[in-house]
Image (cartoon, grey):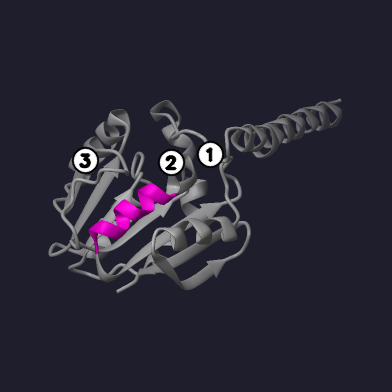
Amino acid sequence: MKIKKSCRVGRVFLIVIGVFLFVWLVVLKLIAKFMDGYGAPCPASLAWVVNNPIRRWYMRPVLDRVGISPGETVLEVGPGPGAFTFDAARRLGPTGQLVAVDIQPEMIAKLEHRVDEAGLTNVATHVASAYDLPLPDDSVDRAFLVTVLPEIPDQIRALQEIYRVLKPGGLLSVTEEFMDPDYPRRQTTIRWAEAAGFEVEARYGSWAIYTLNFKKRG
């Protein structure tokens, strides 16, 4: 009896997981496509979805691909609750600075609380639109976005603004994962970036999780 009951529980669990994956990977992707290929930022109430131990584990190569060096000024657009912010800040060291910009005040509030708790002094946070970054021209060594770009309604306009704040020869790194309902194909991301003036420098990963690095021309 116990074995049969355990099997029934296991089947129910698999069904629940299957339904969740179907909704997440199929229904939400269709909705995103219907909405002209983009969705909306992940709400603060679902911050745990983008910042949990499992996701942090399988996304761990991302910052290696970004190539952060100590002492740089780095821009993170759409940090959310900080899934990548803390590791990036530590790689920059005390002489570097990470500028985290998010359009949602609730996300920035969560991030600021965690930054204070961690005692990080090289993180500057801003509530701002990707179309109007609070940074001067040619002031950033590199910028990175992780599963953020397709959530911005006008991707090319946002990338043009990032282009403005990057130093000549500066690097833009864009990472996307298939589990994201707004997941764009590599070629789509390349098309957006090239339209904003960038050129492809490096490609990493596979269809499941890819990173594209671009250089600012000139």
Which mark is drawn over residue 38?
A: 1
Question: Are dots 1 and 2 in contact, CB under 8 Å?
Answer: yes
Q: Nearer the viewer, residue 148 or 216?
A: 216
Badge 1 crowding class, 10 Å Cα cut-off, few under 14, some 14 to 19, many 20 or more, is many
Judge left or right: residue 142 versus residue 176. left
Main SS, magenta region, reads helix
Residue at 46% x, 51% y is: 56
Q: Give coordinates of residue 110: x percent, y percent.
A: 29, 33
Mark 3 and mark 2: Cα distance apart in space: 17 Å
Q: Magenta stretch: residue 158 in it? A: yes
Residue 59 visible in the displayed image: no
Label 2 sits on a secondary structure element that is loop
Badge 2 crowding class, 10 Å Cα cut-off, few under 14, some 14 to 19, many 20 or more, is some
Label whose residue precedes the other's in the sequence (1 or 3):
1
Which callout, 1 or 3, points to the residue nearer the camera?
1
Q: Nearer the viewer, residue 44 or 156?
A: 156
Q: Give the vertical position of 195 relative to 56 (above or below).
A: below
Q: Nearer the viewer, residue 74 or 166?
A: 166
Label whose residue precedes the other's in the sequence (1 or 2):
1
Residue 103 visible in the displayed image: yes
Rendered image quadrant of residue 143? bottom left
Which mark is drawn over residue 126?
A: 3
Residue range (magenta):
156-166
Which mark is drawn over residue 57?
A: none
Q: Nearer the viewer, residue 190 or 203?
A: 190
Which callout, 3 or 2, points to the residue nearer the camera?
2
Mark 1 and mark 2: Cα distance apart in space: 7 Å
Q: Which residue is mark 2?
A: 152
